[in-house]
Image: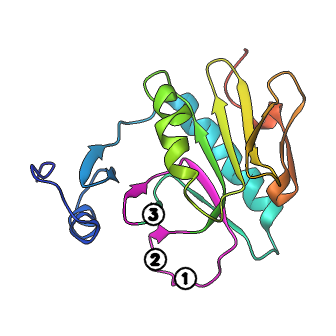
């Protein structure tokens, strides 16, 4: 079954999307098919999940990856590459989350403009979100946006450092570990 030709309500999208083999994001009634990822993207997601999962072990927070949805009000449902939530009030069958505190997007040439602009603008509507990280496997750049006490998002460029610092969860991951398995820069 292809993408619906008319605008969908959030409930219609969730019912339709549950039966799809491929992932599809939702924005104000429109559906957008997700493109397949490349090896570098997959490698960085796997590395982040391993290190975040180990760091969060024994806490109330959990890391999830690109097959889980994040709902933003009634307007959007997106598939972040990696996110952390500390909300333990969910069932094992749940696939839609609403309270991430950290979202990481692994950039690709085709999605980086969207991830930096519109997608970040959508994510900023999530009341629980405190940190948004962008990781580029091609250039090995790492940028982290943190919500400040003043309500503004501050940029921390960690590209030339040794680690990615994720203050929201108190994690520090060596950039070598983030890009492990990627070959030489």
Which numbered disc, 1 or 3, marks the residue closer to the eye? 3
Query: What is the count of numbered marks?
Result: 3
Image-based side of 32 in relation to 150, left or right: left
Q: Which residue is mark 1?
A: 90
The x and y percentages for residue 149 are 83, 55
Residue 179 can be seen in this image: no
Image-based side of 57 in relation to 64, left or right: right
Secondary element under disc 3, as helix, strand or loop, is strand
What secondary structure do most residues of the magenta stretch adopt? loop
Residue 51 lies within the magenta run: no
Secondary element under disc 1, as helix, strand or loop, is loop
The magenta region covers 74-98
Residue 71, label in figure = 3
Tag 1 near tag 2, CB within 8 Å: yes
Q: Which residue is mark 2?
A: 94
Crowding near the residue tagged with mark 3, few <14, some 14–19, many ≥20 C-alpha atoms within 10 Å: many
Which numbered disc, 2 or 3, marks the residue closer to the eye? 3
């Amino acid at each position: 079954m292809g993408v619906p030709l008319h605008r969908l309500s959030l409930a219609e999208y969730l019912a339709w999307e549950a039966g799809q083999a491929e992932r599809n994001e939702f924005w104000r009634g429109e559906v957008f098919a997700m493109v397949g990822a490349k090896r570098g993207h997959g490698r960085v997601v796997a590395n982040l999940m391993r290190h975040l999962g180990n760091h969060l072990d024994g806490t109330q927070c959990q890391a999830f990856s690109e097959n889980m949805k994040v709902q933003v009000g009634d307007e959007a449902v997106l598939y972040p590459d990696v996110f952390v939530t500390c909300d333990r009030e969910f069932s094992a069958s749940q696939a839609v989350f609403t309270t991430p505190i950290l979202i990481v997007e692994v950039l690709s040439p085709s999605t980086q403009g969207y991830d930096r602009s519109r997608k970040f603008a959508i994510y900023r509507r999530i009341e629980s979100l405190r940190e948004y990280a962008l990781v580029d496997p091609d250039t090995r750049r790492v940028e982290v946006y943190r919500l400040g006490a003043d309500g503004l998002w501050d940029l921390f460029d960690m590209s030339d450092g040794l680690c990615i610092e994720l203050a929201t969860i108190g994690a520090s991951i060596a950039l070598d570990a983030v890009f492990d398995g990627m070959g030489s820069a």
